[in-house]
Image (cartoon, rainbow, N blue to C red):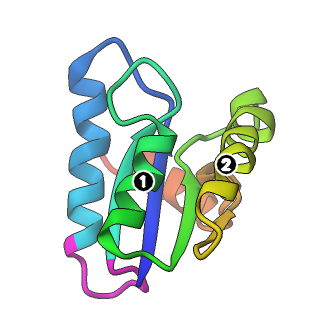
Amino acid sequence: MKALLLIAHGSRRPQSNQEVIDLAAILEKRADHDFDIVVPAFLELADTLIPDGVESCAKTGATEITVLPYFLNSGKHVTRDIPEVITAIKPQYPDITIRVTEHIGASPVMLDLILQTAANK
């Protein structure tokens, strides 16, 4: 079973965290992707931190977890903090393949998204 762990920063503003939770639910319902489950988690400031998200994926039966940093830029959270958390918890799940992808801002489709969004009135 393949899981997508969608990692956002986390906010003191509950509505911001809820947006990520809602996004994960919408992504999970889409049939045109390669993941059986999509789980939201946060780096800090919100419930369901990264280790909790990995645990949730494991309890659901995931054998592969793709960690997607839902960040626009490659700041310290993307380049250091998230990889460090994942490296620290990997030994707890020796039977699960866990990999971290590029952050969302590095996606080549981001250019088109920016231009399409700017062009909409």
Question: Quarter-wise, where is residue 72 in the image?
Answer: top right
Residue 5 location, x and y as percent? 46, 58
Q: Could you tell me which residue is drawn at 42 percent across and 75 percent down?
A: 62
Q: Residue furthest top?
A: 12
Relative side of 49 to 38, left or right? right
What span is colored magenta in the figure?
29-36
Q: Is residue 18 magenta?
A: no
Could you say where residue 93 lies in the image, as x and y percent from the top left?
A: 59, 63
Q: Which residue is mark 1?
A: 55
User: What amino acid is at disc 1?
Assistant: Glu
Confirm or deny contact between disc 1 and disc 2 (CB under 8 A). no
Mark identifier at residue 76: none
Is-magenta flag for residue 32?
yes
Which quadrant holds residue 25? Answer: bottom left
Among the two numbered marks 1 and 2 on one chain, the one whose residue lies closer to the N terminus = 1
Q: Main secondary structure of the magenta part?
A: loop
Dot 2 falls on a residue whose secondary structure is: helix
